[in-house]
Amino acid sequence: MSTVTLIHGLNLAAIYGLMAIGISILWSSVGMINMAHGATFAASGYAAWQVSLIAQPLIAAWLGTGLDASIAMGATMIASGLGAGAIFGGLIFLLAYLPIHEKANFAVRSLIVTLAINLATVQLLLYFFGPRQRALPKIFGLGRTEILGIPIRNDQLGTIVATALLMLVVVIWLKRSRKGLEITAMMQNPEGAVLSGISVRWTALPVTMLTGALAGLAAILLSQTVFVSPTAGALPLIKGLTIALLGGLGSIPGAIMGAILIGFLEAIVGSISFLGQRYVLFSQFLFIITVLIIRPRGLGGLLDQTRESRNA
Amino acid sequence: MHEILKIEGLSAGYGPLRVLHEIDFSVQEGERIGLVGLNGHGKSTLMRSVMSLVGWQNGSIRFKGQEIGGARSTGAGRRTHAIVQLGVALTPQGDAIFPGMTVAQHLDCGAHSKLAWRQRAQRRDAVMDIFPPLRKLESALVGTLSGGERRMVSVGRALMTEASLYLIDEPSLGLAPKISKAVLEALFALPKAGKAMVIAEQNVALLAGRVDRMVGMHAGRLRGDVGHVALS
Amino acid sequence: MPEMKKLYEIGNRPREIFLSPDGETPTRRSRVPFTRRHWLKWRSRYNPKSLKLEKRLEDKKPLWWMLSLGLLLLVTPFLGNSALTVASIFCMFAAINVLWTLIIGTAGIFSLATLAVVGVSGYAAAAFNVYLGVPWPFMFVIGCLTGLVAGGVLALPSTRLDGLYFALLTLGIVEICRVFVQQLKSLGATNGSINQVDSFIPSDWFLQREGLLLGFFGAFALLLGALLLFKLVNSERLGMLLQTARDEEAFAEAIGIDYRRARLMVFMISSAGLGIIGAFYAMYYRSISPSIFSLDQLLLLFAMIVIGGIGRADGAVLGTAIVVLIDKGLLDLGPVRILIVAAIMLLVTLLTNNGLVGAREQFRNYRNRKKSEARARRTEKGGEVMPEEATDMPDKQEIFYRRFNKRLRDELKLLITPELIEEHRRKPLGRHSDALSRVLNYFRRSEMPDKYAILRQPENFNHYKIVALSGERGAPPRLVDDRLYESIDEAYHAVFLLRVNDLLES
C-alpha cells in the first residue's frame, strides 16, 4: 500500500468518523437516529460560506495576506462551522426531541421528524442559495508538508490532525465529565437518571449540539476537497449512517474502527486501476452488508445489549 | 422541632386508578419513620408522588416550606430532578438502576451537586465504609452483582449527595433475611441530625423498635398516625 | 299494538347505519365469490328498549372506499390534461404505498428500499424491451420476476437485522442502486436513463388526450390490484399469522407460528407486486431515469405513508392523495411545496400517534383517558357513581347499590359517638342499644375482601391478633398490625374500632 493511499484513507476515515460518531453518540444517549445530520452538514457548509464572504475582506484589511491572515481565516471557518452545526443541533433538539421524547415509539418518530427536517432544510437551501455549488476558501493552504519523509498535502494533514484532536476531546469529555456520566445514565434508565438529579429533558441539548458541531466540522473539512451544495449532505449522511451501523450503533470505538476500515477500503479500491472510483461505493456497501449479516450488531454491539437487558 | 415534609390532602394515581386518597402526613427533622403496609396499598406511590413521578397527583406537598406538589396530570418526572436537587433522595423499589455502569460510576451518578461531584472520591469512600462489600467490586458492572450488592449500590447512590430527606423504598425486597438486616443496619447507623428518613417496608418485624414512628398504610390511606378514633 | 314513542338518539346512534327488517323473513346475505366472506359486515341485534330487530352496519369502511374510488373513476375523465396526469401519478404512487404498507405494517419489516425495487424492476423491464425486443405485455412478467428476485435479495439481511438497523441498511442499498445505474457505461450517453420504451399506450397517443386517459385507467387498475392484494394478504391467513406475532414474537413461535417465514412471504409477494408497478412506471413514462432512486423521491414517498398513517391501506391512499396534490398539483409554488409537505409531516408526527387516519381514535382515547382521570380524582372509593361513569356500567343495579350504601354510611356516621364506642367496649357481645346494633349490622354485611377476623395465637391460648381476610380463595389472610390482645373481648373491640375507623374515613 503506497503512502499516498494510506494518507488518503486516513483523511476519508477522519471525515466519515466525524459523521458516524455524531450519529452514534446521539443514538446511544438520546435514542434517536438523526436523519437530519446531512442537513446539518449542508447548512453548516453554507453558513461557513456566508461567513467567509463577510470575513474575507475584513481579515484581509486587518491582517493583510500573510500567515496570520490565513490562520485567522481558518479559525473563523472552523468556528463558524462548529457554531452553525451546534445551532442546527439545537434546532433538532427543539423539534425532534423536546415535543416527543415522552411519547411511545420515540425512535421511529424522531427518525421521521428528522427526515422531515432534512427534507425542509435541503429545500430551504435550494430556495435561498440556488442549486449552484460554492467553494469554501482553503483553510490549510495548498502546499505540502513533509512528515517523516512523506510529503502530505496540507489539507489532508489538517483534517486528520483536527479530527483526531476533536475526537480525543469528545471521548475524554464523555468519559470524564459529569455531563458524560449524565448522558450514560439517561440512556440506561431515564427514571433512574431523574432520581439522580439529572434532567432528562435538558441533558439531551448538549448532546444534540455536540453532534451537530461535529457534523459542522465535517462539512468544513470535506469542503476543502468538495464543493458546498444543498444536496451535499446526502452522501455524507448515508456514509455516516452505514459506518455507524458497521461499528454497531451507539458504540464510539466501533464507529471509529468502522470509519477507518471504510476510509481505507475507499482509498484502496479507488487506487486499484481496474476497479477505480466507480466501484468504491459498491465495495463499501457490500463490505458493510457482509459484516452486518455475520454480526448483526456491528463491530461493537455491546451497548445495545445493556439497553436490552434494561428493557427485559 | 422542625417540619421537613408536610403533605396535605394528597391524592395520586395512574390513569383511571386512584391509589392515594387524600393523605395527610408530615415528617419532622431527625425522625426515622417506618411506613408499613402490604403490597399494592400505596407505599411506593406515596414516595413516588413526593418525587412527582406518578401519573397524576393532587394536593400540597411541602418540603422545608417549599411547595413541590400541586395538581399535575402529565409529564411524570419532569420536576423530579429539581426535587432531587432540593435535597430529597429516593432509592426506588427493586434493583440498582443503571445495570451497564460500574459500581464507581453508579455511585458517582448520585453526586449531583457541584460540591459532591468535586468530592466524589471521598464520598465514594464514605459509602464504601458503610457498605464494605462494595469496596472490592468498585469496577464491576452493576448488572453482574448479586441482589444484595445491587441494593447496597442503589442505597449508596442516594447517600452520595447530602440530602435532608431520604425515602427508602422496600430495602428488604427480594433479599435474604441476613442481607436485608445488614442493609437496614447500615441505614439505621446513619446520623440523624438535621435529616429525616422514611423507610417503606412490608416486613414489620424488621423495623420494630428501630424507628421513631411507625405509620401503617392501607388501601391508599394512612393508619395509626392520623385517625378519627384513637386506636387504644 | 301501539307504536313505541320515538327514542332519543344519543351517543353514536345517529351516525350508525341501521336497517329494520321485520322479524319474519330470514336474513340472506350474499358472499364474495369463492370465499366465505360477506360483502358488508351487518350485525343483527334486538334493541333493548324497543325490542325491535335492527341490523347495524358494523364496518363502514367498504362504503367509504366505494365512494371515493368511484368518484375518482367517474370524475377524472372529465378533467383537464394536467389534472389527469396528477390523478394517474396519484394512482401509481398510491399503489406503491399500499404495497409498502404491506411490508412495513403487515410484515413489520422497516424497509426503505421499496422505490428501489420499483426502479430495479422498471429498469430490467425497460432494458429487456429496448435491448432485447421483448414485447410490452411481457414487461409485466419481467418486472414481476425482477421484483421477486430483488425482494429475495433484500429479505436476506432482514432476518438477521432488526428494525431500524435494516431500515438504515436499505437506505444504503438505494444509494448503491442510484450510483450503479448512473455509472453504467452502456447508459452513459443518456445520463443513466433508458428511453424509447414500448408501452401499452400506442406511440401516436403518447402525451395526447387518449393516451393520458388510457394511462389513467391503467394506473387505476393498478391501484385496484394493489388494494386487492393488500386485502388478500393482510386480512387472510398470512396477515392473521403475522398479527399474532406482532406483539409477542416468542409466544407466536411457541404456538407454532413460523412468523419469520410468513414475513418473508409477505415481503416477497409485495416485492413482486412492486415489480409489476415498476414495469408499469417505465411504460407510462416510456422511459426510466435514475431519479427514481434519489433520496428526495424516497423521502416524498415516505412522507406520504407517514402523513396517512403507517400500517393501514386507507392511510397510505390518503397520504398519497395529500402529498401528490401538493407536490404535483401546486407546481407554481416551486420549492415551497416540498416545505409544505415537510411541515405537514412534521406536524403529523409530532401530534398524532399514527398519522391522520389514526387521529380520530387517538382523540377518543385521549378524551376517555382524561375523563377517567378526572373521575378518579373526584370519586371516593365505594362512593356514589358519577353520571359519566354510570353510562359505562352494564349492570345498572350496581349504581343503585352504591348510592344506597353511600347514604347508609352517611347515616351511620352520625350514630357513632364516644358513648357508643364505650358501650361496645363494655359489652362487645349480647344485647345492644338500637344505634349500636344498626352499626354492627352494617359491619356484618360488609364484603369479604379486607374483612377483619380474629386469629388465636397457636402458642398462647389467650392471645389474639387481628387479621384481614384476602377475599380470595387460597390467598391467606394478612396481619393488620402486630398488636397482641390478651382477651377475646379486647380483640372484638379492636376489630370494632378498626371498622369504625374505616367507616369514618370512607
Image (cartoon, rainbow, N blue to C red):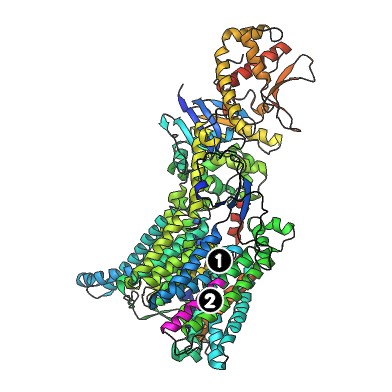
Residue B25 image offset from top left, x and y in percent: 51, 26
Instruction: Name the amino acid type tagged 1.
Output: Thr
Q: Name the residue located 38 percent from the left edge and 70 percent from the top edge.
A: A122
Q: Name the residue located 53 percent from the left edge and 33 percent from the top edge.
A: B166
Compare marks 2 and 1 and give the one earlier in the sequence: 1
Q: CA distance from mark 2 to mark 1?
A: 15 Å
Pick the residue in front: C410 or A237: C410
Q: Toward which corner of the image does residue B79 lie, by quadrant? A: top left
Pick the residue in front: B64 or C82: C82
Q: Which mark is residue A188?
A: none
Element at label 2? helix
The image quadrant where one finds the N terminus of chain C is top right
A189 relative to A258, above or below: above
Residue B106 image offset from top left, x and y in percent: 56, 47
Residue at mark 2 shares a chain with residue at mark 1: yes
Query: Which residue is under mark 1?
Result: C101
How many other residues sit within 10 Å of disc 1, few (<14), some (14-19) or many (≥20)?
Answer: many
Element at label 1? helix
Residue C428 image offset from top left, x and y in percent: 69, 10
Label tally: 2
Pick the residue in front: C219 or C166: C219
Residue C141 image offset from top left, x and y in percent: 61, 83
Instruction: Name the amino acid type tagged 2.
Output: Ala
The image quadrant where one finds the C terminus of chain C is top right
In the rendered structure, which segment of residues is drawn in magenta?
C203-224
Q: Name the residue located 57 percent from the left edge and 78 percent from the top edge.
A: C275
How many other residues sit within 10 Å of disc 2, few (<14), some (14-19) or many (≥20)?
Answer: many
Q: Is residue C87 visible?
A: yes
Instruction: Please state the chain letter of the residue tagged with numbered disc 1 in the rendered image.
Output: C
Between tags 2 and 1, which lies in front? Answer: 1
Query: Which residue is under mark 2?
Result: C116
